[in-house]
Image: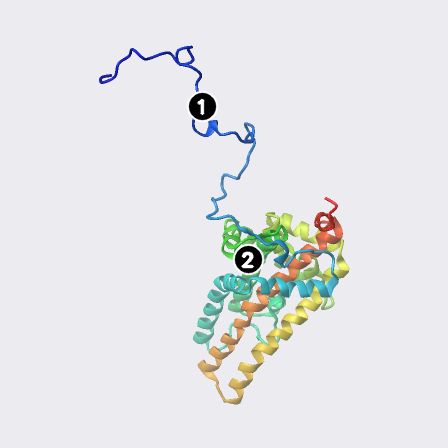
Amino acid sequence: MTGAGLSGWSAPGSAAAGPVTPTGPAAQPGPAGPGAGVAVARGDEPMPTEPPADLGDDGPLAGVGPVGVLGVLDGGFALLRFRFAGIVGVSAVVLLPVQLAELVVALNSGVPSGSDALTTPTSFEVLAASSTTTVWSTLFLVLLAGATTWVGMVVGVLVASWWQGVDLSVTRAAQTAGRRWWVVPVLTAVTLAVKVPATCFLGIGFVVADAFLFTAAVVAGAERLGPFASVARSFDLSRRNIGVALGVVALGLFLTLVIQLVVMAGPLLLGSALGIDGTAGLVVQQASGLVALVTVPLTACFAARAWVEFRCRSEGADLDGWVVRRGLA
């Protein structure tokens, strides 16, 4: 070492050197951090660009509690309205490719490849799949079922965060569901394996089976469960609230059918009145099927609000918020 003398040097901690003054983060007083071996974050979770905002009393689930069948349906509409553009946009990512592929097949074959849009509501894709005889029809209806499962998972992630008062963005919810993409095909296959045979029982078997399974996709997203655990969880919640489950499924199917009839009948009847047929007629019919961009997420929102309802009724999940709102905690 050059350029410095050693005459003023003293060993650290000696009397000549004086007390050592800590510098850096250790010099700042603060609460003790977690002990060794205590996990504070998942290693596979990416760091958020910015923390989500708190919803407070402005969230769609603020002050939530048991509301009954009609309250669940009304709450489903409220969930969809809260982030309508984002939820419909995420649904379009998986639904539009299926719609475009179906249009290409229809144009090449000269006949529609799917079920009759006016008589098959979105939630009845399993019934249509069980009654169709063509390979293309079955393929597209199974793809629609998979897309419905994906949308249900995304809505489940969103609703779970909204229930905690966190305004999670739709993009981050889609990313969270996307990291568990493998759940979609497995869960779709399991639910189809139950619903399709159920359609053979007195014509109401599908509604009964759907009442036990319609929250499975939401559970997979909200509670981060696997496909089989999600089915078991959905079955358990519906079993303990079977009256509400049957009411929500039956009225939910009726509402989606009405929406599709109202939205789709206009273009189809106009095309028929103007004598539009052939290729143009197929395009009009397939384009009218874009109403699924609304009915699929609406069905998922019904299921998500039903999941909240079941947990409030069976597990008292709303009691903590009830105590806080009344100043008891």
For disc 1, the marked residue is 22
Local packing at callout 1 (Cα closer than 10 Å; few below 14, some 14-19, many 20+) is few
Mark 1 and mark 2 residues within 8 Å of each other at the beta carbon? no
Vertical relation: 274 (above or below) 116: below
Q: Quadrant of residue 204?
A: bottom right
Residue 240 drawn at (x, y percent): 76, 53
Q: Residue at x 58, y 62 (%)?
A: 82
* Quarter placement of the N terminus: top left
Residue 136 drawn at (x, y percent): 51, 68
Helix, strand or loop under label 1? loop
Q: Quadrant of residue 250?
A: bottom right
Vertical relation: 215 (above or below) 102: above
- 126 or 181, nearer to the observer: 181
Q: Which label sits in the foreground, 1 or 2?
A: 1
Q: Decide if residue 206 is in sight here.
A: no
The amino acid type, in three-letter code, at marker 2 is Trp
Helix, strand or loop under label 2? helix
Question: Going by the picture, which residue comes out furthest to the left?
Answer: 2
Q: Decide if residue 209 is in sight here.
A: yes
Comes first in the chain, label 1 or label 2: 1
Disc assigned to residue 180:
none
* Quarter placement of the C terminus: top right
For disc 2, the marked residue is 150
